[in-house]
Amino acid sequence: MALKFLRLLNFEIEQFLLQSNWLLPIPIMLFISYIAISRVLVESINRSAKVNIWDGLFSIFGNESILFFVVTPLFLYLVSDLLPRPAFIQSMLLRLGSRKLWWLSKILTLGVAVISYIFITVGLAVGISSFVLPWQSTWTLQHSVEFHIAPAVRVLSPAYAFMQLIILLALGWFCLGLLAIVVSQFIGRPIIGLIVGISANFGGLVALRADVPPPYSHFFIYEHLLLNYHSFGISASPYPPLLASILYWLVGIGVLCMLGLWLSARQDFLSQ
């Protein structure tokens, strides 16, 4: 059973990630990186401020407009068709003989998709940034807020802060992707799952732009997806600590995994 599961999982991951639409992030990230890093260079010249690669990376992955309008919706689009057609689901279930293993294969494939997406997006951003911005171990830009680096973040080293940001993005994308898949599984239409996932994404942006006050803001995803909206040990901060955001995503992932398992056990795939 285990060997059969691993073979099917490997086949599913290869079939999913080798689709042509996974080439789409490449030109999009190249364009975004070019625009964001050009802005960093122009502002550094205008303000006579030194910059390094961290200013470029945070201007991409810490920018709520880029994150909510482009990078996250693109990921949801790529994973929205993770559930195969009913006929293929039936053949998979017949081979595995277990709906639990079938659902586990979806969760693991989504996890591989998240990791692959991070490697593609971050790898391209690092590659483009390193051509024009120097590698340094310290913050350099004085006007950090304009480049999406809150003063509270600067208590951390740039590499450690960026690692924490990537952890939040990975958990957030996994949770939103899982939401889209579970809705697709329940409704039977991937487009509905995509719409729900993107709606949750833009709901966070609306809450951010509307300046929803605490504690109500803690329920929206922007506080748990963007590194700037965390307390970093400041007791008077209205924002949650990083651990609270990690728990926020883990609870969401756990609930959706159980819901997807429940649907898998009760859904009649043969009638679809």
Image (tube, grey):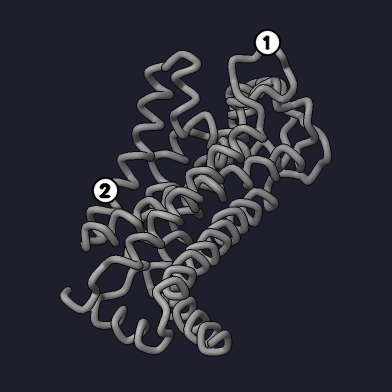
Name the residue rendered at 42%, 79% in the picture. 98
Q: Amino acid at mark 1?
A: Ala
Q: Quadrant of residue 262?
A: bottom left
Per the image, the residue denoted by label 1 is 236
Q: Nearer the viewer, residue 208 or 141?
A: 208
Farthest-out residue, top = 236
Name the residue rendered at 32%, 86% in the picture. 91
Query: Is any atom of residue 180 visible in this view?
Result: yes
x and y percentages locating residue 183 in the rendered image: 29, 54
Q: Is residue 264 above or below residue 92?
A: above
Res 195 label: 2
Q: Earlier in the sequence, mark 2 or mark 1?
A: 2
Q: In the displayed structure, does residue 136 sit left or right of residue 97?
A: right
Q: Nearer the viewer, residue 214 or 159?
A: 214
Q: Secondary structure at mark 1?
A: loop
Q: Quadrant of residue 80?
A: bottom left
Q: Secondary structure at mark 2?
A: helix
x and y percentages locating residue 254 in the rendered image: 50, 50
